[in-house]
Image (spheres, grey):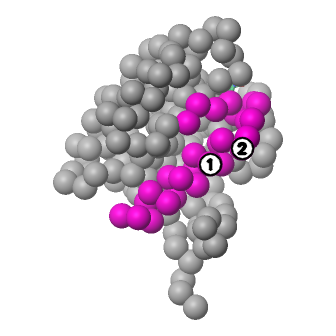
């Protein structure tokens, strides 16, 4: 039997966008309200994706790293989740520079990536429109998900991680 594939996924985005909440939601199907914001963790997780067992190593970055640390994370990863917070325009504006860093460090490869707009439950204080996220994802030629680590309607969080695995496996 073929060895089950392993993919290394890193989660990027400004501190406070909900990276840890999303990762914990994906792994445990639970929402944890407070999570040490300075903590960086890796998790190992297996999932059945398209009838194949895939082992994921997931790096939940803190989002406060200096450039050397960030580059190290980019070199480590095979695929990337870039997260912004729909209620924080500044976090959306940090997406393009992060994408540029991926392209810079990984060139000449085009980098497997998904874009996630988190905290969709907070629609009443939204600062970034859904169509803006869609447009940015189209520019970056990647999949886009708006989701909520706390509500997670329709299992969108898992869908984003699974799609990223597929994207990595396609390369
Ligand atoms: P990180 O710094 O990107 O890892 O962000 P955290 O996962 O620590 O989350 C930062 C804050 O946002 C915490 O207070 C979370 O409870 C909150 N949060 C995370 N995801 C969501 C979400 O989907 N909806 C809402 N309303 N709050 C969230
Ligand atoms: Mg965190």
Above/below status of 48 relative to 104: below
* Residue for badge 1: 159
Mark 2, other Cα within 10 Å: few <14 / some 14–19 / many ≥20: some
In the image as oriented, which residue stretches furthest toward the left?
108
Q: Secondary structure at mark 2?
A: helix
Tell me what residue is drawn at x 65 percent, y 23 percent.
Answer: 120
Residue 57 lies, in percent from the top left, at: 56, 59
Asked if the magenta segment contains residue 158, the reply would be yes
Circles 1 and 2: CB distance less than 8 Å?
Answer: yes
Mark 1, other Cα within 10 Å: few <14 / some 14–19 / many ≥20: few
Q: Nearer the viewer, residue 44 or 97?
A: 97
Tell me what residue is drawn at x 40 percent, y 43 percent.
Answer: 142
In this image, 151 relative to 51: left or right? right
Q: Main secondary structure of the magenta part?
A: helix
* Residue for badge 2: 155
Asked if the magenta segment contains residue 38, the reply would be no
Magenta part of the chain? 145-171
């Amino acid at each position: 039997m073929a060895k089950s594939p392993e993919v290394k996924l890193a989660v990027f985005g400004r501190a406070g966008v909900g990276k840890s909440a999303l990762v914990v939601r994906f792994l445990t199907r639970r929402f944890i309200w407070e999570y040490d914001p300075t903590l960086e963790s890796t998790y190992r997780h297996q999932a059945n994706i398209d009838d194949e067992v895939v082992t994921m190593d997931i790096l939940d970055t803190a989002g406060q790293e200096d450039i050397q640390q960030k580059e190290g994370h980019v070199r480590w990863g095979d695929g990337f989740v870039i997260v912004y917070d729909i209620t924080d325009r500044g976090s959306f504006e940090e997406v393009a520079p992060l994408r540029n860093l991926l392209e810079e460090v990984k060139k000449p490869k085009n980098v497997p990536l998904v874009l996630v707009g988190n905290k969709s439950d907070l629609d009443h204080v939204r600062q970034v429109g859904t169509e803006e996220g869609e447009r940015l994802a189209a520019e970056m030629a990647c999949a886009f998900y708006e989701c909520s680590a706390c509500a997670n309607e329709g299992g969108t969080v898992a869908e984003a991680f699974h799609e990223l695995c597929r994207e990595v496996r396609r390369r």
